[in-house]
Image (tube, coloured by chain):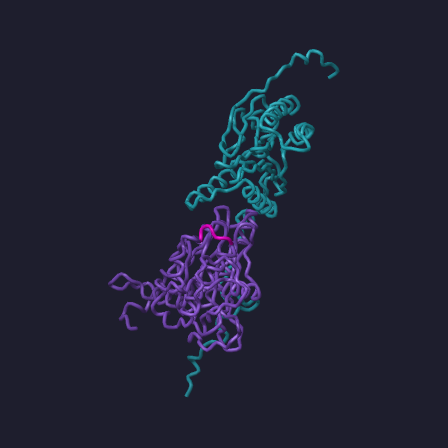
Chain colours: A cyan, B purple
Amino acid sequence: MMNNSCAQPMWLNGPSPGQFYNFMGGNNAPAQLPRELTTAGPYGTKHSTAAITTGSSVLGIRFDKGVLVAADTLVSYGSLARYQNIERVFQINNKILLGGGGDFADIQSIKRSIDQKMIEDQCCNDGVVMKPAELSSWLTRVLYNRRCRMNPLYIDVVVGGVDEAGKPFLGNVDLRGRAYDDYVVATGFGRHLALPLVRERKPKDREFTFEEATKLIRESMKVLYYRDTRSLPQYTVGICTANDCSIKGPFKVEENWTFAEGVTGY
Amino acid sequence: MFRGQYDNDVTVWSPQGRLFQVEYAMEAVSLGTACVGLKSKDFAVVVGLSKPTIEMGLSQPKITSIDQHVGICIAGITADARVLGTYLRTECHTYKHTYGSLYPIQRLVNNLGNKMQISTQRYDRRPLGVGLLLAGYDDKGSHLYQVMPSANVFNCKAMAIGNRSQGARTYLMKHQDNFQLCSNDELICHGIQAMSYAASIDEPLKLSIGIVGKDQPFKILTPVESLSYQKTCKPPDTSDLSWFPETLKEFDSSAASTADSAPGPSAPRTETNSQPNLSVTPKTSKNQVDNKKSS
């Protein structure tokens, strides 16, 4: 005789009424949405829509044996020249320089992530050093990913350096993950003011020499100081060749305002 | 093979300090047919001995390419190897997507080793029953790594794993000093000859050959190409049998008949050589590995 009072309930492990069956069997638990998308409240999370503390131009020039990356030492708060002695060109490892324009907090954030990656590289202890082109590619992925989450990092960075063979690389990645590499790259106002100046001087048949590149950096930083209101007459220059990767400076722009007496009509 | 109460579980030590389950997994490698790998300064070559798992059947793939700069040759349980191959391929692909460059070989095998180690330390896992020879080429030159079920990863100049691989290892040990400066053709020839000591003598060698190196993406030679290599490669200097493994001597019927003493494997030879284990006439294999899962 079956004892019906002890019968198992039917449809064990099934979905409760109105629910769907979990075909994944709990193996692939749905990934938790990032907190930036799950904040409670009537409006959810508000992402930043503009940079607050900003660095202006970064200028990079590639020459035959390496790259130069220059940026002035100003971090503005709106139109206020708030922080006047902050280096915006960083040495990442012995082969990579990073110059940051845009929101300085976001630059510090990405810099911290990159530094962590360099530490992980060293922890592997296999002699593999990240190349500038790889960092540029990685930044593209990260920044594009942030853009897709509608929470971009408001930065515009210049990545430069040399690879193991000593071949120089100079590239630019912006807040949407757009990237390109060229013999000269610039961010901010430098893109309008410095880029054409450098391109004008480019010999068609060869790369710049180191002397030409340094001269162009000096001239361009002067032009940027004269014509970009968010700039200072003080800048640092990162230099990366096969033998040396370091930040030089700060240097002063040779300013001369005697012509100002003749300026009229404003 | 009774090891008492210490071999039921991979997490249990024997009083002698051994992990029997891991050692059993290593046995699975020697059930698979042999793999030989060797490298020069600019090239790395893997040679696998293919045997059909069933008569008339196609043999399981011995060599699979992972990325344009890496390939593996497997010995052991093919299904386990496929899992590893998929893992390696995914890793390389992800790396390429993220960094736009090729995965550094050493980092790749170290990560693989770390992944495999987990299954030697958990009671609810089993070690993978597959050994790998991983050939690759990157910025730091050519690489050959041996990966074992015990999750050991060894950087090798040359190595042979799998069934009856001792003969091949002896050959490689004898010739290892020559490999560094070999051309790619010479390297393949050395690989084929090493393999001829791991294969039974009474059947034709059915080899798969993979090569990777400078300006040479990982390539698995077509059957025609590998046959032509087998034809042109000189047989080992059979007049000198001092290093020849004792166990194989009795099978070597041609030791006396071939008395060609010209040194080096590089000189191409057009006539079919007389050593039976390098003959290319198709014959039905009689000598099957009894474990049908192994390749």
Q: Which one is in front, A166 or B17?
A: A166
Q: Which one is in front, B124 or B13?
A: B13
**In terms of image quadrants, where is residue A119?**
top left
Location of residue B137 in the rendering, given as x and y in whole percent from the top left corner: 50, 51
- Secondary structure that dominates the magenta span: loop
Looking at the rendering, the stretch of residues picked out in magenta corresponds to: B179-183
Residue B180 located within the stretch drawn in magenta: yes
**In terms of image quadrants, where is residue B19?**
bottom left
Image: A162 above or below B38: above
Location of residue B53 in the rendering, given as x and y in whole percent from the top left corner: 48, 74
State left or right for residue B147 relative to residue A39: left
Residue furthest bottom as drawn:
A1
Task: Name the residue: 31% across, 68% down.
Answer: B7
State left or right for residue A29 relative to residue B155: right
Image: B269 above or below A73: below
Q: Quadrant of the C terminus of chain A?
A: top right
Residue A152 located within the stretch drawn in magenta: no
Residue B180 visible: yes
**In terms of image quadrants, where is residue B35?**
bottom left
Q: Quadrant of the N terminus of chain A?
A: bottom left
Image: A240 above or below B132: above
Task: Name the residue: 52% across, 27% down.
Answer: A86
State left or right for residue B57 relative to residue B249: right
